Image (spheres, rainbow, N blue to C red):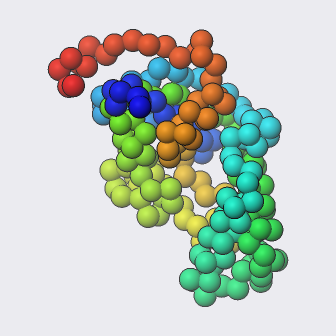
């Protein structure tokens, strides 16, 4: 079990966040929370890097398809009519392709964040995955209004500005994917003794 003060997570500012000039705002919100950035870089990801970032297992892909089907049906649309298919696995594969197109459409900023309950705190700062459902005061709630229906009808990924690891296992895997050990820096922020 990691000391809660040393918990690490990965945050990616996606191409839409970079193109909209939100890098500084994202960093500001992280640092204001008392979290520290221990690794930071900008890169234009390759298709292979994105393929290795997102899960490939059939369950995850099928779940993507099921979410899209349920979303379209909840608004009265026929998934087969709008997406040309109604098989959740096929739709999930197509959505995964949309993710590739989105995530390789421009540079991203990758960072490793460390601090008290970093995984949970960063996800709270980011807000719900679907911006239209995210609370005001979060990155997604303040800077995007995109949603599943619009993305599905437009046959593209949801433009949700950032990605944040969801679990300790995911954080560990994603940090190793985007950073080498020698790119992570340990240091003490001046307010650590006061805050914790």
Judge by depth and name the residue closer to the eye, 50 or 27. 50
Q: Position of residue 56 (x, y in %)?
A: 74, 51
Quadrant (top left/top right/bottom left/bottom right) for the N terminus: top left
Image quarter where the C terminus lies is top left
In the rendered image, residue 86, in percent from the top left (x then y), is placed at 77, 79
> Residue pushed farthest left?
194
* Image spot of residue 59 (x, y percent): 69, 61
Q: Using the image, determine if residue 124 lies above or below residue 39.
A: below
In this view, 168 is above or below 183: below
Residue 196 vertical position relative to residue 9 in the rendered view, above or below: above
Q: Residue 25: tell me if it is visible.
A: no
Location of residue 93 (image quadrant)? bottom right
In the rendered view, tell whether residue 37 sits above or below residue 143.
above
Residue 114 appears left or right of 79: left
Q: Position of residue 108 (x, y in %)?
A: 63, 34
- Name the residue located 45 percent from the left edge and 51 percent from the top edge: 140
| Residue 3 figure quarter | top left
Q: Quadrant of residue 5?
A: top left
Of all residues, the one furthest to the front in this rendering is 1
Q: Residue at x 53, y 28 (%)?
A: 111
């Amino acid at each position: 079990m990691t000391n809660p003060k040393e918990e690490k997570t990965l945050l990616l500012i996606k191409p839409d966040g970079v193109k909209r000039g939100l890098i500084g705002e994202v960093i500001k919100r992280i640092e204001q929370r008392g979290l520290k950035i221990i690794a930071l870089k900008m890169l234009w990801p390759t298709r292979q890097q994105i393929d290795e970032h997102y899960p490939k297992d059939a369950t995850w892909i099928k779940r993507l398809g099921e979410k899209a089907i349920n979303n379209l049906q909840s608004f009265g649309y026929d998934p087969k009519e709008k997406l040309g298919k109604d098989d959740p696995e096929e739709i999930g594969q197509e959505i995964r392709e949309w993710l590739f197109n989105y995530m390789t459409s421009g540079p991203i900023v990758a960072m490793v964040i460390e601090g008290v309950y970093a995984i949970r705190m960063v996800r709270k700062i980011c807000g719900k995955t679907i911006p239209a459902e995210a609370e005001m005061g979060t990155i997604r709630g303040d800077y995007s209004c995109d949603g599943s229906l619009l993305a599905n009808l437009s046959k593209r990924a949801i433009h949700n500005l950032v990605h944040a690891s969801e679990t300790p296992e995911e954080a560990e895997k994603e940090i190793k994917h985007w950073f080498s050990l020698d790119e992570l820096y340990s240091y003490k922020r001046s307010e650590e003794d006061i805050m914790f």
